[in-house]
Image (spheres, rainbow, N blue to C red):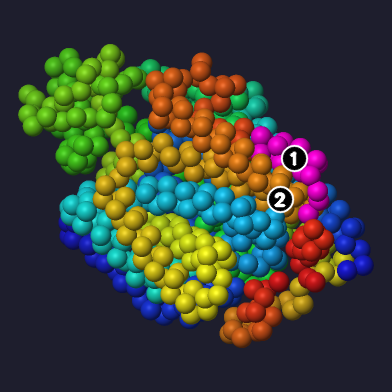
Amino acid sequence: MNDRRGYWKENVNLVLKLLLVWFIASYGMGILLVDFLNEFRLFGFPFGFWMAQQGSIYIFVALIFIYVVKMNRIDKKYDVEEDESHIPIEDMNREDINKSGGA
Amino acid sequence: MDIQTLTYIIVGITFALYIGIAIWAKAGTTDDFYVAGHHVPPLANGMATAADWMSAASFISMAGLISFMGRDGAQYLMGWTGGYVLLALLLAPYLRKFGQFTVPDFVGDRYYSNAARTVAVICALFVSFTYVAGQMRGVGIVFSRFLEVDITMGVLIGMSIVFFYAVLGGMKGITYTQVAQYCVLIFAFMVPAIFISILMTGNPVPQLGFGSTLADGSGTYLLDKLNGLSTELGFGQYTDGRKSTIDMFCIVAALMVGTAGLPHVIVRFFTVPKVRDARLSAGYALILIAILYTTAPAVASFARLNLIDTVSNAEYQSTPDWFKNWEAIDLIAWRDKNNDGKIQYVAGNAFVGSPQFTDGRGPSGERLLANADGGSANELYIDQDIMVLANPEIADLPNWVVALVVAGGLAAALSTAAGLLLVISTSVAHDLFKKMLLPDITDRQELMFARMAVAIAVLIAGYFGINPPGFVAQVVAFAFGLAASTFFPVILMGIFYKRMNKEGAIAGMVTGLIFTAAYIIYFKFIDPAANTAENWWLGVSPEGAGTIGMVLNFVVAYAVSRVTSPPPQDVQDMIERIRVPRG
């Protein structure tokens, strides 16, 4: 509650940094620089071709998990993480969830 | 056992499994029906999202398309995975915090306007119906080739299965069925890929296999051999691109942003218990999708090499059974132009358009064609959709593998169809009836409406499956273009730009919608002859039009919002609330 502005700013900063990597991996190395990178080889792959058809996807996966870990940390730092660490699945009748749809 | 008996057994087992799950996961409330009660654990949601997302197009068509496109096929690989990064970082957590049922819900509440909600409902319905029609074509192809029932019967069987679990279980039934379908489809995709990778390169990991040397002891890298053969036959290097850079850029952007804006994908993140689960399950979903998406390009190059090896300069009479089987259902065609009885497979169209068979047989026993000549030495026509289904046969794998691939293709098509049907029913029952036309109905009545809406949607989808509109392939670009140029910008600005108001959002959506629709309709329907790079605006093909539409949407929305009044205080408070996980 007390420092929502700070929380939001850190959140947006993190997202922008990750999206920069996202852009470089896919549009940068997989499209714009692909022919240049094809001059280099990674085992049997021309490197640009590998980035376009493989590498970029691995980087996407890594980005989401980095985001998950860092966001959880930021949530904790600003004390805005959700109450319990885990809601048991059997707990079907929690009122706040059913009534307000979780909000 | 022969392929057909095995196929019946394996497909039968998977169908029985789906029905069993449906009975177990019956929905009792609208909460269950729309969002599985917000109780789906993140990993299960990840699997369901992956199955929801990977359609007949991903499973059946994509590797085939890449096989024929070479490096440019990366547009699908990057475009249909990169969107999950946008989804996880920019949309999913906030939409989960918002906590309603649908995308039009968010648009309607955030922009305090039923006009905005209506535009959103129309887009959601259009996108979903477009997509469902494609799934049904997939089901039809699979049934007619492998189970030798006619397409109508095949579609009816598929529809009744979906009908059963979607009407009974709603989102809850669909979610847990999709978990099972993910397992079936990924197993079915990986087994033949691993087999073929071992056969061709000795490496059991397909992702590494297609960068390895061939197992024939020559020491040549697989891609080098493929590049050599492709160049020899006039197709150009497999690892080179043919599309212009700007076109590639716009197509990839439209597919990525479109992915993040598709309502049946977004709604999956409404089903998890918490905000942090929404983030995590996007990560799980992408890993599970990436397993298939990193294997597909490997399968594509294996299939390409195998295909060229098998058919190039082969005698028609000595071609394997699969060749004639696919020819029998119109998906392969051969015209012996130089009358040597051998298949010349080189660059260029064998003839104009898709094959029009006559009743007659040629000297080698091939089916004769009525098409006009394509003006090249190429004699072979291959429908790109058959590559994944034919691949195990081309590589001469055991019959049970072929049967497994059939079950996988059906799982992919049915899981996506179910997710889409649910979006359609929710849009009608919840957004249209409950929120606008009949606000006084009870939860039970709304649930009944939702069930009826699914039932009707299944029937309409079934109709399109049996009588596929000729324009299915063309309208897929439409679905992504519309999602990219309408939903994505308004949702994104709704979260990240507090000043965005009703006027801006509606103006933006309408601009994006009109531009993208007009661009695609002009080049695909009004003047298809002009659909060439010289005529495209900025060199962007209709497939990439959604990207320009999206940019226009952002610009117009921003400009209009600056000169109109800011959103009311309660909406601004709501935005503050959805930005933090708690409170």
Q: Is residue B212 above or below residue B48?
A: above
Q: Is residue B429 above or below residue B315?
A: below
Residue at mark 2: B502
Q: Quadrant location of residue A16?
A: top right
- Quarter of the view holding residue B380: top left
Q: Residue at x 74, y 79 (%)?
A: A84
Residue found 54% across the figure and 42% down from its top: B482
Which disc, if any, is residue B335?
none
Residue B129 against residue B78 in the figure, above or below: below
Measure how far apart labels 1 and 2 are at the Cα level.
10 Å
Discs 1, 2: same chain: yes
Q: Residues within 10 Å of mark 2 (few under 14, many from 20)?
A: many
Left or right: B374 with respect to B99?
Answer: left
Q: Chain of mark 1?
A: B
B229 magenta-colored: no
Residue A45 coordinates in the image, percent (x, y): 55, 33
Q: Is residue B552 magenta?
A: yes
Q: Nearer the viewer, residue B336 or B466?
A: B466
Ranked by sequence position, the earlier of labels 1 and 2 is 2
Q: Which element carries disc 2, helix, strand or loop? A: helix
Relative to B422, residue B40 above or below: below
Disc 1 secondary structure class: helix
Q: Amino acid at mark 2?
A: Lys
Q: Position of residue B145 (x, y in %)?
A: 22, 48
B407 or B102, nearer to the observer:
B102
Residue beneath the point at 81% across and 51% down: B566
Residue at left offset 54%, top offset 39% = B481
Magenta region: B551-567
Tag shown at residue B560: 1
Where is residue B392 shown, x and y percent of the image? 31, 47
